[in-house]
Image (tube, rainbow, N blue to C red):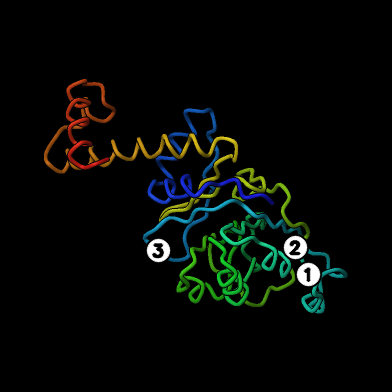
Amino acid sequence: MVDNLSAETREKLMDVSVATLATALYKRGLRNQVIQDVRPVARKGRNMVGPAFTLRYMPAREDRNTLAEFRNPKHKQRQAIEQCPPGSVLIMDCRKDARAASSGDILIKRLMMRGGAGVVTDGGFRDSMVVGELEMPAYHSRASSPTNLTLHEAIEINGPIGCGDVAVFPGDTLVGDDDSVIVIPAHIVDEVASEAVEMTAYEDFVSEMVLGGATIIGLYPPTDEKNLEIFAKWRLEKGR
C-alpha cells in the first residue's frame, strides 16, 4: 500500500473535528462517511489520523477455525498486525458483531510498537481497559467476551471492507476524535483537509463570540456580512 497522505495534510487533520469533516464531505455529496456505533475505547484529547489498512472478518466455520489456527504463522489476524505500515490505521470489518474480539491488548500493543497510528473495529476488543490505557488511539463498539475466540475468521487483508456501514478502501484517510471516526476518500483528502482548517477557524471564532454573549443569528451561519468583517480582524489578531 502506498501512503499518499502528505505530512502537511496529516498535520491539518490533527486539528479538525470529525463533525467539521463530515460537513465538508456532505458538501461534496458524501453523506455516509462517519462509522456508525464506533467510539473511542478511551479519550485521548488528540486526533487519530492515518491511511486505512484493512482486515475483513467473516463468520467462522467450525472445521476451519479451531484454536489450533492461532498457531499458524500465516494467520491473517496476526499477519495484519505485522503488515500494517507505520503511520497507518488498522481498520477491521467485524460485521458489527462484538461477541468475539477483533483483537486484544497484546496484538494492539504490537501494532503500536510497530508505529501504527490507531486501530478501529465495528466489533469489539477484549482487554479493553488495557487497550484504553495505551498511547495509541483505539475505537470499537464495546468490550468483547474473552471466551468467544472462534466466532469470526480473519479472511482478507487490505481489500475493500464495510466498517460500521461505511465503505472503506485501502489508502482512504481515517480521522478519529474523541467522539467518532470518519472516512475520507484518498483522492479528495488534501482539499477536504484544507477546507476543514478554514471551517475550524470560523467555528473557533464563533465559539469565542458566543461565549462573549453574541447571538448566533447572522453569525452561525455567517449571513450577516459584518460578522465576516469581524472574523477577518480576529484572524489577523490570532494569526489564523
Report how far apart the C-alphas of labels 3 and 1 lie in the structure: 31 Å
Mark toward the start of the polypeptide (3 vs 1): 3
Where does the image place residue 16, in percent across and percent down from the top left? 39, 46
Residue 71 appears left or right of 220: right
**Picture residue at 74% right of the left edge, 71% below the top:** 150
Q: Nearer the viewer, mark 2 or mark 3?
A: 3
Q: Secondary structure at mark 1?
A: loop
Local packing at callout 1 (Cα closer than 10 Å; few below 14, some 14-19, many 20+) is some
151 up-or-down from 47: above or below: below
Q: Write the residue at 40% across / 63% down.
A: 43
Mark 3 residue type: Lys
The quarter of the picture where the C terminus appears is top left
Residue 170 position in % (x across, y down)? 67, 48
Image quadrant where residue 89 sits: bottom right
Residue toward you, 193 or 43? 193
Residue at image mark 2: 154
- Residues packed near mark 2 inside 10 Å, few (<14), some (14 to 19) or many (20 plus): many
SS class of the residue under badge 2?
A: strand
Q: Residues within 10 Å of mark 3 (few under 14, many from 20)?
A: some
Kindly identify which residue carries mark 3: 44
**Occupied quadrant, residue 64:** bottom right
Q: Where residue 200 appears, x then y in whole percent?
A: 33, 40
Q: Which mark is residue 75?
A: 1
Proximity of marks 2 and 3: CB atoms separated by less than 8 Å: no
Q: CA distance from mark 1 to mark 2?
A: 8 Å
- Left or right of 237 on screen, residue 128: right
